[in-house]
Amino acid sequence: MARRVLSHASALVVLGVVACQVAPIAIVDCRSTADCEGGTICSPDHTCISKPDTMEPPPPSTHTGDLITWDATGTVPDGSNQYEISGPWFLYDDCGAVLPQIENGAFDCSPDAPTKNCCTERDASLVGPPPLDDAGWTVTAGVPGESSGSACVRLTTAVHEIPSQWGAGLALNLNNWGAFDASRDHAGARIVGFSFDIESGSSADTTLLVGVGTTDNDSHYKPLTIPVSGAELVFEELPYAYSDPPNNLDLTAITRINFATPSTESAITYDFCVTNLLVLVADDSPSSSMPGTGGTTASP
């Protein structure tokens, strides 16, 4: 699966390069696209040009964003925001699928494998919140109206040899392990996605698969290179799904936000923190009015 995901991401990069090579035809001077005729756009050098067939859609408009805050246990408390979002962060990995195959002889793990037991190896220097106190991640509480807090991961994924070696993921529950209905208005606002910062403890750029999970165990996501500030996860722009053929995203069945660390042909160490998590609402939704939500604006 990781190979398919990465090949799809590479294909998108190639298509983007091809799109940039299209030579548009200049027509007239302009200040903005509003000064141009239908089917044309205003270029950076202020000329109306024909819109290339392969041109990507414009980025989403600026959305109103409201801060989501969690406590020292990594849980967004019930009633802490007007969007009815509540639930804990958690870290999951592929060891529960790989270890049984080693034990029953279905998979021979090399003693020279870069990770223990040929599955995700968590960094024991990070310890998760009680009661599990599990290794590989940690959380810091935020301050309502001021900060979200942080959720951090440090682990190494296995070399991908069998399907069970899919990697790991950090996720935030949106409705305490149940379905969150993002299709309806919440306090008069229509949720269109999320925004966040991802800090990285690595000197090299690293790619995560960022998206949302659903009740049918599907996941809709996009590749995101970190570190990044103000990254947007907009529902209508999630191009991939694990299912084959891909299912449409069911906004009534979203369960979590995922920050997945895929297993690939080489072992990869992931070291990052998610901070400044905002709920993004449609431009026509009213600004937040609930005290302590930290209403702000997230740029695309």
Image (tube, grey):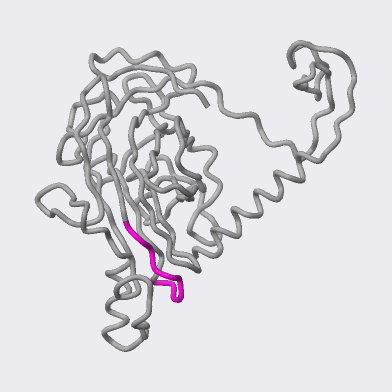
Q: Is residue 113 left or right of residue 291?
A: right
In front: 255, or 92? 92
In front: 15, or 187? 15
- Outermost residue toward the front? 203
Instruction: Using the image, determine if residue 158 lies above or below residue 20.
Output: below
Instruction: Using the image, determine if residue 48 lies above or below residue 75.
Output: above
Residue 283 in percent (x, y) is at: 49, 19
Q: Is residue 156 magenta?
A: yes
Residue 110 in percent (x, y) is at: 37, 83
Q: Is residue 14 left or right of residue 231?
A: right
- Magenta stretch: dominant secondary structure: loop
Residue 216 in percent (x, y) is at: 37, 55
Q: Is residue 55 magenta?
A: no
* The residue stretch that appears in magenta: 155-164
Residue shown at 25% from the left, 50% from the top: 137
> In which quarter of the view is residue 132 placed?
bottom left
